[in-house]
Amino acid sequence: MNEGAGKTDQTMATAAAELFLLGQKIVQARAVLAALQKELGEANTRVVDSQYVEQLIEANQQLVQAILLAQSNAEALQLTQDEQQLNLDMREANEQLVLAALSAQHLQAAAEQLLEQQRHILVLVAHELRNPLTPISMIAGRLARVPSEELPRMQALIEGQVQQLSRLVEDLLDVSRVSTGKLHLDRRVLDLRAIIDDAIETCRPAMNTRHLHFSSERPDAPLMLEGDPIRLKQILGNLLGNAAKYTPAEGRVELSVIIQGEVVQLTVCDNGIGISAQALPFVFEPFIQDAQAIGFNGAGLGIGLTVVRELVEAHGGTVTGMSEGSGRGSRFVVRLPLLPP
């Protein structure tokens, strides 16, 4: 009898020791979990350390083993209510650790993807800034030896490259202004017809260079609205410029302007390379370019249409892009509110 009682006491002591160790593991697990929650709060500014994730998974595995050991002991010994609560707490800590480890892995993958995207953007910006600077540098080195009759042509080349560089920098600044809420419009009452004519004349040299067939149609009636004349010209100039850039030589570009009630609708369409079905939903997102567009004309950062969308929406309008697919051309429709008669 005493021998049986002694074995029971020994089993109780062993179980108590194991439960004490389990309690320590739960405390450690909660400390690790608290540290992880703090780490996750700072995950938007740094990449989660993969070694830390491995440590969490290892701690989780140790807890799983501890739970299995506690369950086997429970079969030989009826646990008290406090011990059962301790087991439940341990299970909960284990579940939280599993979720935390998975979340940390997801954050690490997202951060690595963001870093890769930023590197890609920096490469694009550096490439596009270098393109106009190279001919400017070459011309500057030759100015001292250029005959006087060649100077006007050199000056025109430099001015063209400077304008390209200025447009690129201005587009980058516009994207930055939009993201920081600092985009400003110098609004005034104006007739959109003058803006349309000005934008056409600005883009006509690029179309003539590619021998494109351009046609336009607009109403003779005034198109009065409240807007920023420079920004409105930028909207139409970007759309016409894109049509010229991505339409093969001898292609067709059309601009039509119609009045629909209290809205003026401007449509720019072409028979160029079109937009793939995969890229069409993201055509207005910054730094996104269709693969076929890069292959056809690698110039550009993929922010021109982003600027168009933001400027149109800042004027209270909408813009949509449509295409039937690769090689089927594209169509962009801008709708802006007119002033009441």
Image: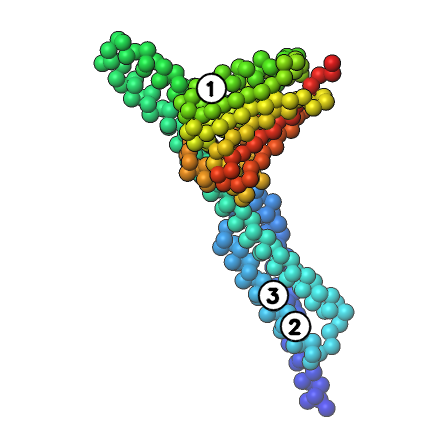
User: What amino acid is labelled 3 in the image?
Assistant: Leu
- Disc with the residue nearer the chain's start (2 vs 3): 3
Q: In the rendered view, does 179 fall on the left or right side of 123?
A: right
Q: Is residue 171 visible?
A: no
- Kind of residue at disc 1: Arg
**Residue situated furthest left in the rendering:** 145
Q: Quadrant of the N terminus?
A: bottom right
Judging from the image, what secondary structure is the residue with disc 3 in? helix
Q: Which mark is residue 204?
A: 1
In the rendering, at what x and y percent does residue 69 appear?
A: 62, 73
Between residues 3 and 233, which one lies in front from this camera angle?
233
Q: Nearer the viewer, residue 120 or 187?
A: 187
Q: Which residue is mark 3?
A: 63
The reply to whether dot 2 and dot 3 touch (C-beta < 8 Å) is no
Q: Is residue 66 left or right of residue 241?
A: right
Q: Position of residue 233 (x, y in %)?
A: 55, 18
Q: Residue at x 51, y 18 (%)?
A: 200
CA distance for labels 2 and 3: 10 Å
Circle 2: element type: helix
Residue 100 found in image quarter? bottom right
Residue at point 72% right, 69% down?
A: 83
Mark closer to the observer (1, 3)? 1
Query: In this image, 339 relative to 280: left or right?
Result: right
Residue depicted at x 28% and y 12% = 150
Residue at image location 55% in from the left, 21% down from the top: 216
How far apart are the two marked residues, 1 and 3, measured between alpha carbons?
72 Å
Measuring from the top left, give residue 161's x and y in whole percent.
Answer: 39, 21
In the picture, the disc for residue 254 is none
**Which residue carries the number 2 mark?**
70
Residue type at tag 2: Ala
Q: Earlier in the sequence, mark 1 or mark 2?
A: 2
